[in-house]
Amino acid sequence: MKVEAIKETIKETLKQMIENKDIEIEDDDLFYEDLGVDSIVIVQIFLTCQEKYGVMLSDELNLLEPISVNILTNLITTKLKEKGKMIN
């Protein structure tokens, strides 16, 4: 699994779930602060990524901490590396 592919999946999932479909999502944009998504959308994104990549992220989800595409990508890649499924 490549890092850029994971980032694109997260960005596409975000775009599908937020009201402003024309928004440009940058890797460091914070979901709450910069993109204005709520906790329900964040949980849905985590669940989508869990299902798509076959990793457990629920123990990593803390809705009080900032989350961005890069932060979520790092969580996923860490979990994939633990399972021996990560390819740069």
Image (tube, helix red, strand yellow):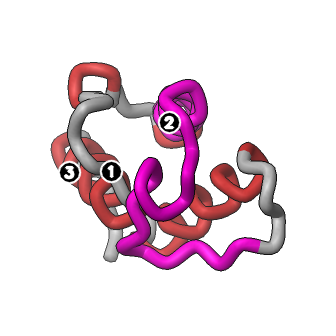
Tell me whether circle 2 and circle 1 mark residues in contact (CB < 8 Å): yes
Task: Check disc 3 and give the amino acid type.
Answer: Thr
Disc 3 element: helix
Query: Residue 40, position in %: x, y?
Result: 56, 25
Q: Earlier in the sequence, mark 2 or mark 1?
A: 2
In the displayed structure, 85 sits above or below 52; it is below
Q: Quadrant of the N terminus?
A: bottom left
Residue placed under numbered mark 2 in the picture: 42
Q: Earlier in the sequence, mark 3 or mark 1?
A: 1
Kindly identify the residue that appears in the image at 23 percent across and 21 percent down: 59
Kindly identify the residue that appears in the image at 64 percent across and 53 percent down: 14
Q: Which residues are magenta?
A: 23-51
In the displayed structure, 29 sits above or below 13; it is below
Measure the alpha-carbon separation of dots 3 and 2.
19 Å
Say if the magenta span includes residue 30: yes
Kindly identify the residue that appears in the image at 42 percent across and 69 percent down: 29
Residue placed under numbered mark 3 in the picture: 78
Tell me whether circle 3 and circle 1 mark residues in contact (CB < 8 Å): no
Kindly identify the residue that appears in the image at 81 percent across and 73 percent down: 22
Q: Quadrant of the C terminus?
A: bottom left
The residue closer to the viewer here, 46 or 33, is 33
Mark 2 nearby-residue class (10 Å; few <14, some 14–19, many ≥20): some
Residue placed under numbered mark 1 in the picture: 67
Comparing labels 3 and 1, the label whose residue is closer to the camera: 1
Measure the alpha-carbon separation of dots 2 and 1.
9 Å
Say if the magenta span includes residue 29: yes
Query: Residue 81, position in %: x, y?
Result: 21, 52
Measure the alpha-carbon separation of dots 3 and 1.
15 Å
The residue closer to the viewer here, 76 or 1, is 76
The residue closer to the viewer here, 42 or 80, is 42
